[in-house]
Amino acid sequence: MKTTLTVLLIVELCRLSSSLIIQHFFVNDEETWDSARRYCQSNFHLLSIFPSEYQQQNFLEYAADQTSDAWVGLYTENGVWKWLGGENATEINWDVNQPDLVDGCAFLYRSRQKLHDANCSAKYAFFCMNISEFVLVRQNETWEGALEYCRTHFNDLASLSTASRMSSALPEIALAQTEYVWTGLRYLAGHWFWLNGDNFQNLLWYQMILPQCPARDRRCGALNKQSKLWTHSNCEEKFHFICQ
């Protein structure tokens, strides 16, 4: 299937339920609901869902620039509206006189930013979502600038304090267009530390040898995207960065 991803990239943080980052992508190809579901599961995670009021409001706000009506991951099962995954839908932003079918699937009506139902065999564009622990920001910032951006738009600069967290972050880091990527590693008050409060230890998997007393202008931790080696860098350097 030839697919066009629009410029629309909706990024929302599930602050109320988890620290996972959800990215929504508007796919501007018309498919049936089931074909859209299969496409999203093959290329992303699933058709977009937003079960809580917070997630729904955030989604609708950022979806304002969609270019056509689009399926979401809401459907009926035995007359009950459910989100993909099986959760009963209790907070649905229906338009007036909606839903008007006994069984169907839901799409976001572009002109009113409200949900409508339709026969699942109808063809619309659709929203897919990715779920991840980390997201790379392809924007050149100083360490402080990266910190401010992550805390404004997500949660924090990423603390890659365990082997599993590092493994989860590496696919995102590989997409960087700068040699180094800022992380939540910092030297202050005589010691290195992670922003999330995890203990900084001499773990072999880091391949990390950082000075106990770095120069004043080299007290921010960056990761080389190619070698996966850590370095202490000038905090005023501008790199891409990874948020959590």
Image (spheres, rainbow, N blue to C red):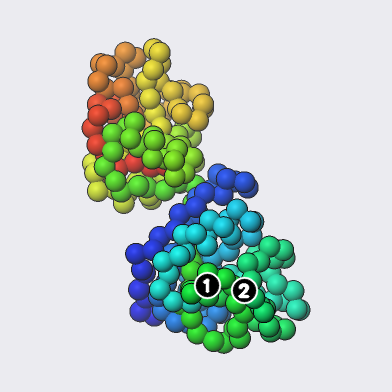
Specify the quadrant of the image occupied by residue 3. Answer: bottom left
Contact? badges 1 and 2 (CB < 8 Å): yes
| Residue type indicated by callout 2 | Asp
The quadrant in which the N terminus is found is bottom left
For residue 4, side relative to residue 115 (left or right): left
Specify the quadrant of the image occupied by residue 236. Answer: top left
Specify the quadrant of the image occupied by residue 85. Answer: bottom right
Gap between marks 1 and 2, in whole Å? Answer: 8 Å
Mark 1 nearby-residue class (10 Å; few <14, some 14–19, many ≥20): few
Q: Position of residue 156 (x, y in %)?
A: 46, 37
Residue sitting at 28 percent across and 27 percent down? 235
Q: In this rendering, does residue 233 appear at all?
A: no
Q: Label 1: which residue?
A: 112
Q: Secondary structure at mark 1?
A: loop
For residue 165, side relative to residue 238 (left or right): right
Mark 1 or mark 2: whose residue is earlier in sequence: 2
Residue sitting at 35 percent across and 47 percent down? 137
Q: In this rendering, does residue 124 appear at all?
A: yes
Q: Position of residue 102 (x, y in %)?
A: 72, 84
Tag shown at residue 2: none
| Residue type indicated by callout 1 | Arg
Residue sitting at 24 percent across and 36 percent down? 238
Tag shown at residue 95: 2
For residue 74, side relative to residue 145 (left or right): right
Q: Secondary structure at mark 2?
A: loop
Q: Is residue 133 above or below residue 229?
A: below
Residue sitting at 47 percent across and 44 percent down? 154
Q: Position of residue 132 (x, y in %)?
A: 49, 51
Q: Position of residue 188 (x, y in %)?
A: 39, 17
